[in-house]
Image: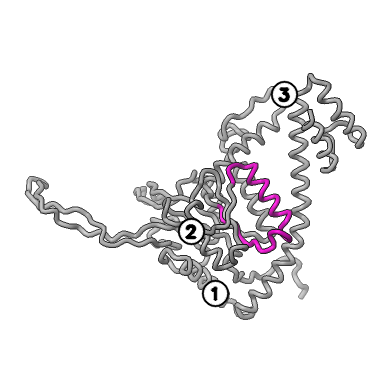
């Protein structure tokens, strides 16, 4: 029988950070600290980096956390471009980035979407002032925000840097599609479209919350209930503990795992978090009858991963160069449009472009040539 050209059998990856991880929970429960400790235990302090995104400042209270402040999209692009470009040198040990929080990442992406929309306008097109009006409306702007975020995260994944998403939660009312009954669910505080776009990419999503045991205590007071005098009672917290849920049989907690044998819930603890994932991986790995031991598989997969990363590094550099070229051309178009009545600013650009072999500054196809032309705008 002729061997098939397409189709291959999947072998379970044994590295916990080979999977897309997520952890959402109420503010202040310790998500960032747990993520930091999990990463340090798995890959050491050089193996992870926390992106402190937008208006998040939870890193301030975490001793020794390896992080970088990312207040806006330009900074996000600049830093991720640099990491990708220098992955094999400065960042050779970097294995995972913690996005703290994914809510804030979308907030800083939205102004970039509006900018991208407005940079492509022609003629009498009106500029967009909000994400709702960008890219044709009807959630076209939101779709673009999802696109640019996922493209950036996957560019990092291609060079061997995994993702660990952190987010916030709140209780939302849901309606059962079969019965029409309403129920409460602990889920994300993000726009559902954004959350769903990222959640579908996750292999594991843990939900952190506080499990409280409440007992009714008599207050010693009498109250009237249905015209009957009764002794008043109030709820008192008897015990409480932080926990992480990976699977909820009642579907009241919006957790998720693609590993069917993962434990339902664990204490809020980094060691327990790692054990839960590694145990789930081991169960799936051992279901395979034609593979080596988990230790041998790990060695083989690490070597395969290095080859893929090396191949993707070169491809990513080419993509980054093309992207930088496109950004310069957009900036040149904006500069020319803003100064079209001032020949003293436009003429030097035209002259240099022709000397370099281009019909005009925006027709440039080489990154280094584009940089030379753009440098002229900085001296005017």
Residue 177, given in percent of the width and then of the height, sits at 41, 50
Q: Quadrant of the N terminus?
A: bottom right
Q: Is residue 366 magenta?
A: no
The crowd level at tag 1 (other Cα within 10 Å; few <14, some 14-19, many 20+) is some
Q: Nearer the viewer, residue 372 or 278?
A: 372
Q: Is residue 95 magenta?
A: yes
Q: Tell me the tag on residue 282.
A: 1
Left or right? Give the position of 172 relative to 60.
left
Residue 131, given in percent of the width and then of the height, sits at 57, 35
Q: Determine which residue is flagged by label 3.
A: 123
Residue 201 is at least partly visible in this image: no
Q: Quadrant of residue 247?
A: bottom left
Q: What scheme was used to colour the molecule?
A: one colour
Real-space Cα distance between discs 3 and 1?
Answer: 60 Å
Q: Determine which residue is flagged by label 2.
A: 33
Q: Nearer the viewer, residue 41 or 237?
A: 41
- Give the magenta range: 70-99
């Amino acid at each position: 029988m002729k061997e098939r050209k397409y189709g291959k059998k999947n072998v379970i990856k044994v590295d916990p950070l080979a999977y897309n991880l997520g952890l959402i929970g109420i503010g202040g429960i310790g998500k960032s600290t747990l993520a930091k400790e999990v990463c340090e235990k798995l890959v050491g302090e050089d193996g992870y980096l926390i992106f402190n995104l937008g208006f998040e400042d939870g890193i301030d209270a975490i001793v020794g956390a390896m992080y970088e402040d990312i207040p806006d999209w330009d900074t996000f692009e600049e830093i991720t471009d640099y990491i990708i470009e220098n992955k094999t040198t400065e960042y050779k040990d970097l294995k995972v980035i913690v996005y703290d929080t994914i809510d804030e990442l979308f907030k800083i992406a939205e102004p970039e979407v509006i900018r991208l929309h407005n940079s492509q306008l022609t003629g009498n097109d009106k500029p967009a002032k909000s994400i709702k009006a960008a890219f044709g409306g009807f959630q076209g702007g939101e779709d673009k925000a999802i696109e640019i975020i996922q493209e950036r995260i996957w560019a990092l994944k291609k060079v061997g840097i995994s993702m660990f998403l952190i987010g916030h939660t709140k209780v939302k009312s849901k309606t059962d599609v079969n019965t029409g009954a309403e129920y409460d669910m602990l889920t994300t505080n993000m726009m559902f479209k954004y959350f769903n776009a990222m959640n579908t990419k996750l292999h594991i999503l843990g939900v952190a919350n506080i499990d409280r045991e409440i007992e009714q205590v008599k207050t010693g007071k009498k109250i009237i209930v249905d015209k009957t005098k009764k002794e008043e009672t109030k709820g008192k917290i008897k015990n409480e503990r932080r926990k992480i849920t990976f699977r909820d049989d009642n579907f009241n907690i919006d957790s998720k795992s693609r590993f069917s044998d993962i434990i339902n819930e664990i204490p809020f603890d980094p060691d327990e978090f790692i054990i839960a994932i590694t145990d789930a991986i081991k169960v799936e790995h051992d279901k395979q009858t034609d593979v080596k031991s988990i230790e041998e598989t790990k060695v083989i997969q690490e070597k395969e991963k290095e080859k893929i990363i090396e191949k993707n590094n070169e491809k990513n550099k080419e993509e980054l160069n093309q992207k930088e070229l496109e950004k310069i051309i957009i900036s040149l178009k904006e500069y020319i449009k803003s100064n079209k009545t001032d020949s003293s600013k436009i003429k030097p650009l035209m002259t240099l472009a022709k000397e370099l072999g281009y019909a005009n500054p925006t027709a440039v196809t080489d990154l280094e040539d584009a940089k030379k032309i753009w440098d002229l705008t900085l001296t005017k």
